[in-house]
Amino acid sequence: MPEPGPWPFDIVLRYQIERWRQAVALDADGQVVVLDGDPFKLYYHWAERRVGALTGPDWLATVDVTRRHFIEGDYGLADLVLYSDPGAEALRVRKEADPTRSRRNFERNTAMRTVLSPVVRSRGCPRSATGGLGTSARRAR
C-alpha cells in the first residue's frame, strides 16, 4: 500500500487512517499487508523531540493526539518494521543525485537517524552494511 503524495496535512492524515484501517481489515482476513513507511510517523515526532526540533509542549500535544487516535483505532503498530540506515554520506549522495525533490528537512532528518539507529539496534535487531531489521510490538486489537 503506497505512501500518499505531497498533500495538505489533513488530507494525508485522513488517507493514512483509511490506509491503516484497510490494512487491519486485510490482516484480519489472513492476508499479508506491507505498508511503505510509517503511516503516522510515530517515530518521527519522538526523534524530533530527541534532537531538540520539537518543543516540550508540542511533544505533549502530539502525544495527546496520538493517544486519541490509538484509542479510536485509527492508529496502530506494525507487526514487523524494516529499518535501513545507509549512513549520512550515502544519504547526501542520494540527495545530490535527485534534484526533483527539495528535501527541505534533510539536515534535521539526517540528524534524527542518530537517534533512531540505536533504538533499532537496542531491540536486538541484526544489522548489515545496508540496513537493519527491527520488530515492533503487536498492535492492540
Image: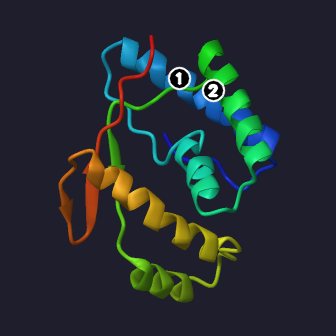
Front position in the image: 4 or 70: 70
The residue located at (51%, 26%) in the rendering is 76
The residue located at (42%, 22%) in the rendering is 139
Looking at the rendered image, the quarter that the C terminus falls into is top left
Is 90 situated left or right of 110 in this image? Answer: left
* Residue that numbered label 1 is attached to: 22
Residue 75 occupies quadrant: top right
* Residue that numbered label 2 is attached to: 18
| Protein image colouring | rainbow
The residue located at (65%, 79%) in the rendering is 100
Q: Residue furthest front?
A: 56
Q: Provide the secondary structure element on which disc 1 rests.
A: helix
Q: Provide the secondary structure element on which disc 2 rests.
A: helix
Q: Is residue 79 positioned above or below 43 on the image?
A: above
Inter-mark Cα distance, 1 to 2: 6 Å
Q: Position of residue 48 (x, y in %)?
A: 63, 57
The residue located at (78%, 45%) in the rendering is 58
- Label 2 neighbourhood size at 10 Å, few (<14), some (14-19), many (20+)? some
Q: Position of residue 11 (x, y in %)?
A: 78, 39
Q: Position of residue 57 (x, y in %)?
A: 79, 43
Callout 1–callout 2 Cβ contact below 8 Å: yes
Question: Residue type at mark 1?
Answer: Gln
